[in-house]
Image (cartoon, grey):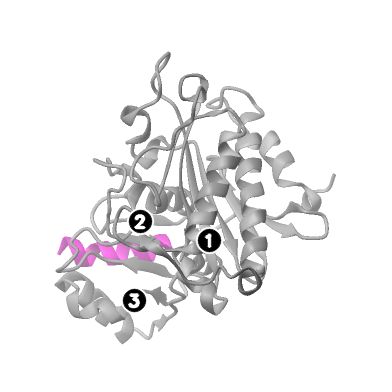
Amino acid sequence: MSSALSSLFQHAMDNSNDEFAQPSDLAVLLNAIGSAGKFISSEINRAALRDIFGSAGAANVTGDEQQKLDVIGDNVVAEALLSTGLVCAMSSEENAGMINCGDAAVSGEYVVVYDPVDGSSNIDVAAPIGTIFGIYRRLTEGVPAGDADILRPGSEMLAAGYVLYGSSTIFCYTSGDGAHFFTLDPTLGDYLLTGESVRSHGSSHVYSANEGNSGKWNNPDLNWVEHVKSEGYSGRYIGALVADFHRNLMKGGIYAYPGDKSSPSGKLRLLFECAPLALVAEQAGGAASDGKTAIRDIEPDQLHHRTPMYIGNADEVALLERFHQS
């Protein structure tokens, strides 16, 4: 099979490593997430026909208004992962605690953290959204998995990636040997390799940030954004983390979601959003930081630990850090 036609499952089989209990485990886990992604993609494409626009009428654990698609996506990803029998613990942005993994809580070898539908409010206007995931090897043995297995820094993550639902459906993953991209071919129902060991684009003088919040920003971020604008940077902001991150990875730039005076820790969740994307960024030659510390070095103190995040081109992240360290 030529590399251009390699499937996600086969590629993962060929690129597993010794940190996985069995060579096939990575492929099985990614295949489960990919299957959930196919369903979510289909639901997005039929959203108006299926009446899944708008709010589900409730808030998630961190107070964000849940969209109907958040609930659907959360259930679909969880069910797909549970069906593998490999997952001892998992948690998502939409749940207050760990998801019950049944007997696999003792026998499963892996922990999965995920954001099932990042940027779900974009569905109402047909803008891009995504799914984010990270995979750890369990630490405990012979007992149901618990906090020790899941509250860990991104530096211990075995694999991570995202699914982007836009003009096409893109599956990106890394298991520590580069960032690889697959495009869903709807006629075949499979993800096919369209970019292997993709490298982060060089600086393109682009920044992605919600400047509508800048009235609450702290001085380092205000000084940084004034500097980049004075240097002729262009602003590109889609409003969905996966979409903004993917664009900057492909085209060059930096995504910024600072803490501010009302939310010092920012909005983004370390486990479900930041650490997985940080691993992808680093494997593509980029970087991710909270302004002073590499994202993957931060120790979470709770499932819904929040952190500021600056992610993208390594030189751009280093420039941002200089404003925070001065």
Question: What secondary structure is marked by label 2?
Answer: loop
Q: What residue do we see at 18% from left, 75% from top?
A: 216
Q: Residues within 10 Å of mark 1 (few under 14, many from 20)?
A: many
Q: Secondary structure at mark 3?
A: loop
- Quote the CA–CA distance across marks 1 and 2: 18 Å
- Of callouts 2 and 3, which one flags the residue occurring earlier in the amino acid sequence? 2
Give the mark toward the camera: 1 or 2: 2
Residue 142 location in percent, x, y? 43, 13
Q: Specify the quadrant that holds the C terminus.
A: bottom left
The residue under the point 57% across, 38% down is: 81
Q: Which residue is mark 2?
A: 60
Question: Disc 3 to disc 1, how far (Cα)?
Answer: 18 Å
Q: CA distance from mark 2 to mark 3?
A: 22 Å
Q: Which residue is mark 1?
A: 130
Between 210 and 45, which is closer to the camera in this rendering? Answer: 45
Chief secondary structure of the magenta portion: helix
Residue at image location 74% in from the left, 39% down from the top? 10
> Of the residues shown, which amino acid type is indicated by label 2?
Asn
Farthest residue, direction right: 1
Q: What residue does disc 3 label?
A: 210
